[in-house]
Image (tube, grey):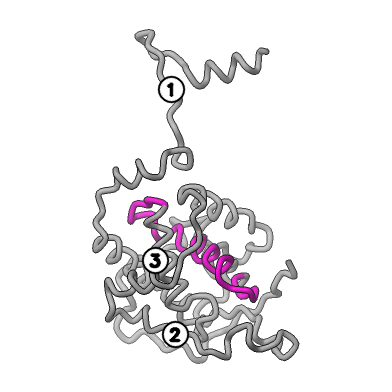
Amino acid sequence: MDAVVWILRTLFRRDDRGRKRKRDLSLCEEDPPKRRRDDRAQPQEEMAAFLRVFEDKYYWMFLACDDCMKISDKYLLAMVLVYFRRAGLHTEKYRKNFFPALFLANQMEEELPFRWQIYPWALGNTWMDNTEVLFQHRDQLLHRMGFKAWVDRTTCDLVMAEAPSHWAWTRERQPDHSLAIPMFRMDKEDFIISDTRFKHPYCILLCPEEGQYSSHGFPAGFPHWGGFPVLRVAVPSS
């Protein structure tokens, strides 16, 4: 009984003037349609903010390392923006939520477990001990979307048509990187996580203030990808 009373007092606590007021809702508890109404960003502003994420060195390198587009082809990237819009995210939250949204998109669309390659980029070298952090961010995003995670191809095409000339929409995956190739014919090298710029990926979710670069793109004369060290980690079995 005491617990019930405590809950009721928490939900309807009084302010200094004696009026009852409801408990303030967290971001995850807010009504998603209300958040979307309150978000002043227009579609073109959302698209511009989304594409600016790829100008960030760290995310640029992530896409460059996925040169076969196994986990970040144009349709998966388009799904990420669809998720952001459904969740009513403000544009300044796009960077922090990029990897959780991309992980969710891979879970929805891909049958091969290449999505595990997102872990070290999102969580850094301690990713094996912090996978729950990525799951928590994914679940919060999913809740904000009202659990509407399925995106059809037409919706993705419409998103890409908003900025058809951007290079992100040229990330076309080759047909041989699909489930059409039996698993027993795949080489273990197909499941290697590589990082051609850093041995120790920064932790975007755990330490965003330290791991996030400024979004000014690459400086003039930035070196090519060849010849940099490669990080190899074991892919979890489940």
Q: Quadrant of the C terminus?
A: bottom right
Percent x, y for residue 225? 46, 87
Label 1 environment density (alpha carbons within 10 Å; few <14, some 14–19, many ≥20): few
Q: Residue at x 37, y 44 (%)?
A: 33
Q: Amino acid at mark 1?
A: Lys
First reached walking from the N terminus: tag 2 or tag 1: 1
Q: Residue at x 45, y 25 (%)?
A: 23
Where does label 3 land, which residue? 213
Q: Amino acid at mark 3?
A: Tyr
The part of the image, by quadrant, that contains residue 15 is top left
Q: CA distance from mark 2 to mark 1?
A: 49 Å
First reached walking from the N terminus: tag 2 or tag 3: 2
CB-based contact (under 8 Å), mark 3 and mark 1: no
Percent x, y for residue 12? 47, 18
Is there any visible trace of residue 58 in the rendered image? no
In the image, which residues are magenta? Answer: 87-115
Which of the numbered marks, if any, corresponds to residue 22?
A: 1
**Element at label 3:** loop
Is there any visible trace of residue 12 in the rendered image? yes
Nearer to the camera, 69 or 122? 69
